[in-house]
Image: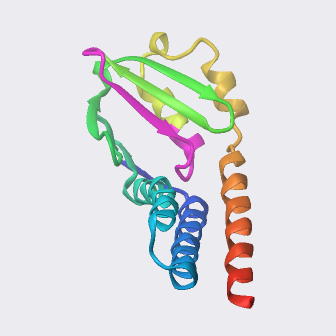
């Protein structure tokens, strides 16, 4: 049995971003009061908070029987024989799509620690006809996508600067 959890770099970066958002909201509330503009700004923290919660909850467990996927919005257990197809997409982030016989779909992104090892485990257990034709190339050339983390770090820097300026004068 192998367990895969979210990579600490993703968790820490989203945790810092979330905390900075709350500090920023606190600074806005102190300086300008709680009004409609405050609530508009507060709504912007919801997607970041949801992503942090999803990262904390995310877990994939590979066993001889199948693959268990725990995620914020969709969790389930898939027996190896019930997998109809596996897809792969790599852009700013890398995604693995698993479709079952009853047409349920599951999405796993590469925010998991040791994502390449997960791909290798799937390759061992899923019938080759259900994997993309270029699966070996995909696994062999896989590199973690850090584009999303770069954007989060930029957001941290911007919000950190705004918070710093609001406290310094």
x, y percentage for residue 45?
Answer: 49, 60
Give the total number of marks visible in the rendering: 0
Indicate yes or no whether the magenta region holds residue 105. Answer: yes
Q: Which residues are magenta?
A: 101-118
x, y percentage for residue 69?
Answer: 34, 41
Residue at 63% x, 39% y: name it. 93
Residue at 47% x, 64% y: name it. 42
x, y percentage for residue 82?
Answer: 28, 20
Q: Left or right: where does residue 128 sit relative to residue 156?
A: left
Q: Is residue 152 above or below residue 60?
A: below
Residue at 68% x, 88% y: name it. 167
Front residue (pair 30, 137): 30
Q: Left or right: where does residue 100 sit relative to residue 167?
A: left
Residue at 46% x, 31% y: name it. 122
Instruction: Check the image and tell me how it is coloured.
Output: rainbow
Q: Is residue 81 above or below residue 59?
A: above
Front residue (pair 12, 78): 12
Classify residue 159 by image quadrant: bottom right
Classify residue 43 by image quadrant: bottom left
- Locate the C terminus and report the quarter of the image it occupies: bottom right
* Extreme-bottom residue of the structure: 168
Q: Left or right: where does residue 111 sit relative to residue 86?
A: right
Indicate yes or no whether the magenta region holds residue 109. Answer: yes
x, y percentage for residue 160?
Answer: 69, 74
Front residue (pair 51, 44): 44
């Amino acid at each position: 049995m192998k367990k895969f959890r979210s990579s600490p770099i993703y968790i820490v970066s989203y945790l810092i971003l979330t905390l900075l958002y709350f500090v920023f909201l606190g600074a806005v509330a102190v300086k300008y009061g709680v009004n409609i503009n405050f609530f508009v700004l507060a709504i912007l923290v919801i997607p970041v908070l949801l992503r942090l919660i999803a990262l904390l909850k995310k877990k994939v467990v590979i066993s001889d029987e199948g693959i268990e996927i725990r995620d914020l919005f969709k969790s389930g257990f898939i027996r190896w024989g019930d997998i109809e197809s596996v897809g792969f997409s790599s852009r700013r982030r890398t995604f693995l799509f698993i479709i079952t016989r009853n047409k349920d779909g599951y999405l796993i992104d590469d925010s998991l620690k040791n994502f390449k090892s997960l791909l290798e485990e799937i390759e061992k257990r899923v019938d080759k006809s259900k994997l993309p034709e270029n699966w070996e190339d995909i696994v062999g050339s896989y590199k973690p996508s850090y584009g999303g983390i770069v954007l989060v770090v930029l957001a941290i820097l911007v919000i950190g600067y705004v918070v710093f300026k609001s406290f310094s004068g």
